[in-house]
Amino acid sequence: MTETIAKAATISKNRILVMCAIAIAINYVLGVFCAFLKLPFYLDTLGTVFIAICFGPWWGAAVGGLTNLMTGLLASPKDIPFLLVSVAIAIVVGFIARKFKFTLLTAVLTGIIIGVVAPVIGTPIGVWVYGGLTGSVSDVLVLWLRESGMGIFGASFLPKLLNNQMDKIGTCLVAFLLLKAMPKSVLPGGMNGAN
C-alpha cells in the first residue's frame, strides 16, 4: 500500500516537472516571438500563470524565474532582473487560484491585478536596466511623455501599465481557456478545466 502511494506521488511529481518544462518553453517562445515582432504585449508569462493556477504559487514562481534565467542566458543577461516580475505574477495568480474558483470573471480580475503588479515591479527594473525603453512600439509613447516633461518613471510606467493590462488579461483568459479544454486526466485532482 505504501509502495503504491509512493509510486503515485512520483508519477504526479514527474507530471508536474514535465508540465513545468513545457511551460518554460512556451514562455520563452512566446516572449521571443513578441519581442521579435516588437508587439506592445509580451505573452511571456502564459506558462507561469498556467502552472500557478494548476499547481500553486511556488511551482509557478519556479517556472517564471527559470524562464527569465534561461532568456537571460540565451538572449540577453539584462532580462534576468525581470525574474522578480515573473515570480510576483506567479505568487499572486497562485494564491488567487487557491482561494477562488478560476472562472472567466476570476481570470479577468486576476489579469487586471497582475497587470498592475507587473509594471509596479518592472518599471524600476526597466528604468535601471534599459533607461525606461523596452524596444517595443510603446517606446514612442515613452519618448513623447518624456518630451512632454514627465519624469522617466512616470513616462515609462504609463505605457507599461497599458501594455500589461492588455497582456495579462489576455494571458489569464488564454490560461482559463486552456484549462477548460484540457482533459481531466492531465489536470491536478479536483480541477475540471477550472478549479
Image (cartoon, helix red, strand yellow):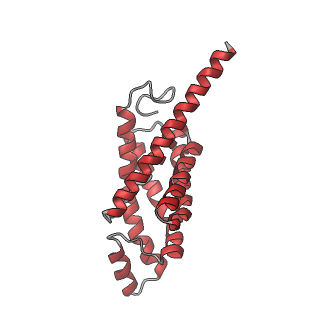
Q: Residue at the spot x=37%, y=41% of the render?
A: 104
Number of marks drawn: 0
153 and 46: which is toward the camera:
46
124 and 117: which is toward the camera:
124
Residue farthest along the front direction in this orientation: 74
Across and down, in percent, residue 28 comes to: 43, 53
Q: Residue at the spot x=48%, y=77% of the render?
A: 153
**Quadrant (top left/top right/bottom left/bottom right) for the N terminus:** top right
Q: Is residue 49 visible?
A: no
Taking the image as shown, residue 59 lies to the left or right of residue 33, namely right
When the figure is inspected, residue 149 is found, relative to residue 133, above or below; the finding is: below
Taking the image as shown, residue 5 lies to the left or right of residue 72, namely right
When the figure is inspected, residue 124 is found, relative to residue 116, above or below; the finding is: below
Q: Can residue 141 be seen in this view?
A: yes
Residue farthest along the top direction in this orientation: 1
Q: Residue at the spot x=37%, y=87% of the render?
A: 147
Across and down, in percent, residue 180 comes to: 36, 33
Q: Residue at the spot x=46%, y=60% of the render?
A: 116
Across and down, in percent, residue 179 comes to: 40, 35
Across and down, in percent, residue 92 comes to: 53, 50
